[in-house]
Image (tube, grey):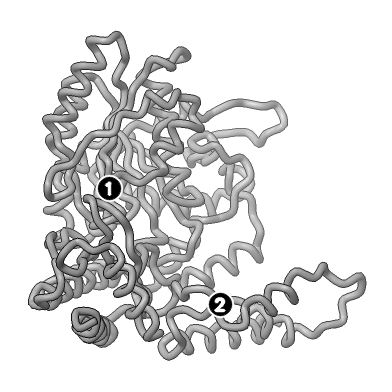
């Protein structure tokens, strides 16, 4: 069975290079078939079931395709998928160290590497989460516990109008009232306006509120903009606030020289959200939170119960003490195996390539008279729109581009108009497909201009 599954998966991945980037054909019939309940007696062969799974995976937009540049998550590294298979097969519990200390050490070693990557110091601690949203939730809860204590409804947190919506959602789940979230405006380059942040904090203090958290973006969802991290860290320090950096998209560019320079100031964060399933190219469900002080993370999350395994095995972390989760899968192997198999330099080189490709896209699209390309990419996302600010033309253009089946872009409304976005993150997206995408955009933009 394992050999048959491996063969099917390998074939599926090989076919991504020629498959359409989106496919919704004959979907209703397939959905009706898949809605059937399981049989009372198993009679269908594994081969037939795998064929059904592969057919279902081919519907929708293909995030594993090298032509998928519509959203940020990466393409699912095969070595990490193998690690997931092994982790599910051995099925060892890693929430506490005692049941599987050697496996916990493997995960802990990767988390220590990440803390060191961001210069967080020996007292820091990381924990793997199901994604960036859960990491942001834990960060908000930790900041609330450390800075506000048991009474917190008068607290206020600050994030720009370009920050990921999971920050506001985290505040809601953490029990903060809606007016606790202060939206800080951005400047013409879509970076947080630090003067506006200072004004908001000062005004809130004057009204008797307690500012407790400043959230900066290390790669916004719309354009990949990196907020002025040092300046926001200064405001947080001046006001005794927790400083959190949402680096779900951009944080791993720290592996490159250019990325480290652009992310200067992230090392001052009290906590950092990362998403290995984005710029580390790993499968969905692999997020991460790093905290400068492990004791703070533990304060917000740890509870004891007599039926739990004993803590403190060989100075290894009990991950449940740093996370909302008790039952959890062995996520660490998804990072450990690819990093040990390929080496960290391979990931750094791939991310350097993405920066180069984004610069290429920007420079090429900027030569097209019919397009407005207002922001040079700081990471690997390029935003553009038809000149004239016509949202209907922008939507028509993205539909024409996606209709080719060779490239899949997204469109979003920000900065007052609809922009198309090319987000180059997948490890499968290489120069040949990017150059093809550029030619498709040029052709469809010219066709649109003549309508």
| Cα separation between marks 1 and 2 | 41 Å
- In which image quadrant can residue 77 be found? bottom left
Rendered location of residue 294, percent (x, y): 39, 33
Q: Is residue 110 left or right of residue 443?
A: right
Residue 268: x %, y % from top left: 20, 36
In this view, the mark in front (1 or 2): 2
Q: Which residue is at a point 17% across and 45% down the rendered structure image? A: 191
- The residue to which callout 2 is attached is 59
Classify mark 1: helix, strand or loop.
Answer: helix
In this rendering, position of residue 47 left or right of residue 15: right
Q: Nearer the viewer, residue 324 or 106?
A: 324
Q: Quadrant of the C terminus?
A: bottom left
On screen, 130 above or below 71?
A: above
Task: Report which quarter residue 21 is drawn in.
Answer: bottom left
Residue at position x 45%, y 85% in the image: 20
Identity of the residue drawn at 13% across and 38% down: 230
Q: Position of residue 306 (x, y in %)?
A: 70, 26
Say if 214 sits above or below 98 in the image. Answer: above
| Element assignment for label 2 | loop
Callout 2 environment at 10 Å: few (<14), some (14 to 19), or many (20+)? some
- Find residue 242 and report its horizontal and vertical position in percent: 29, 27
Camera-side residue of 101 and 383: 383
N-term-proximal mark, 1 vs 2: 2
Residue for badge 1: 116
Between 400 and 435, the one nearer to me in the picture: 400
* Residue 422 shows in the view: no
Residue 72 picture quarter: bottom left
- Seen at 52% across and 68% down, the residue is 83
- Residue 133 shown left or right of residue 26 in the figure: left
Is residue 292 visible in this depiction of the protein?
yes
């Amino acid at each position: 069975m394992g050999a048959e599954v491996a063969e099917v998966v390998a074939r599926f991945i090989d076919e991504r290079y020629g498959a359409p980037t989106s496919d919704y054909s004959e979907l209703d019939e397939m959905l009706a078939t898949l809605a059937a309940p399981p049989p009372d007696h198993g009679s269908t062969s594994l081969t037939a079931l795998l064929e059904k799974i592969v057919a279902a995976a081919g519907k929708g937009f293909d995030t594993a395709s090298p032509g998928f540049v519509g959203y940020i998550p990466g393409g699912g590294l095969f070595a990490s998928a193998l690690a997931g298979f092994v982790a599910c097969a051995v099925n060892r519990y890693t929430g506490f160290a005692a049941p599987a200390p050697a496996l916990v050490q493997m995960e802990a070693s990767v988390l220590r590497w990440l803390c060191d990557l961001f210069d967080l110091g020996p007292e820091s601690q990381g924990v793997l989460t199901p994604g960036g949203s859960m990491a942001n939730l834990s960060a908000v809860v930790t900041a609330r516990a450390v800075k506000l204590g048991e009474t917190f409804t008068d607290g206020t947190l600050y994030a720009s109008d370009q920050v990921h919506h999971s920050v506001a959602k985290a505040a809601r789940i953490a029990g903060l009232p809606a007016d606790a979230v202060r939206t800080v405006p951005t400047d013409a380059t879509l970076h947080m306006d630090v003067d506006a942040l200072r004004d908001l904090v000062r005004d809130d203090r004057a009204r008797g509120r307690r500012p407790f958290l400043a959230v900066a973006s290390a790669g916004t969802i719309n354009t990949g903009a990196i907020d002025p991290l040092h300046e926001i860290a200064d405001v947080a320090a001046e006001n005794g606030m927790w400083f959190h950096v949402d680096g779900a998209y951009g944080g791993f560019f720290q592996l490159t020289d250019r990325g480290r320079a652009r992310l200067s100031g992230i090392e001052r964060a009290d906590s950092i959200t990362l998403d290995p399933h984005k710029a580390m190219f790993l499968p969905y469900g692999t997020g991460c939170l790093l905290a400068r002080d492990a004791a703070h993370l533990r304060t917000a999350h740890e509870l004891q119960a007599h039926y739990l395994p004993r803590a403190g095995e060989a100075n290894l972390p009990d991950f449940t003490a740093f996370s909302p989760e008790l039952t959890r899968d062995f996520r660490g192997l998804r990072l450990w195996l690819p990093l040990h198999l390929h080496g960290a330099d391979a990931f750094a080189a791939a991310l350097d390539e993405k920066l180069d490709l984004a610069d290429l896209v920007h420079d090429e699209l900027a030569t097209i008279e019919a397009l407005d390309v207002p922001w040079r990419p700081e990471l690997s996302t390029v935003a553009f729109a038809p000149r004239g600010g016509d949202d209907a033309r922008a939507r028509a253009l993205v539909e024409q581009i996606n209709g080719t089946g060779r490239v899949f872009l997204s469109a979003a409304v920000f900065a007052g108009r609809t922009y198309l976005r090319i987000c180059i993150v997948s490890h499968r997206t290489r120069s040949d497909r990017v150059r093809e995408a550029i030619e498709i955009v040029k052709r469809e933009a010219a066709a649109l201009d003549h309508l």
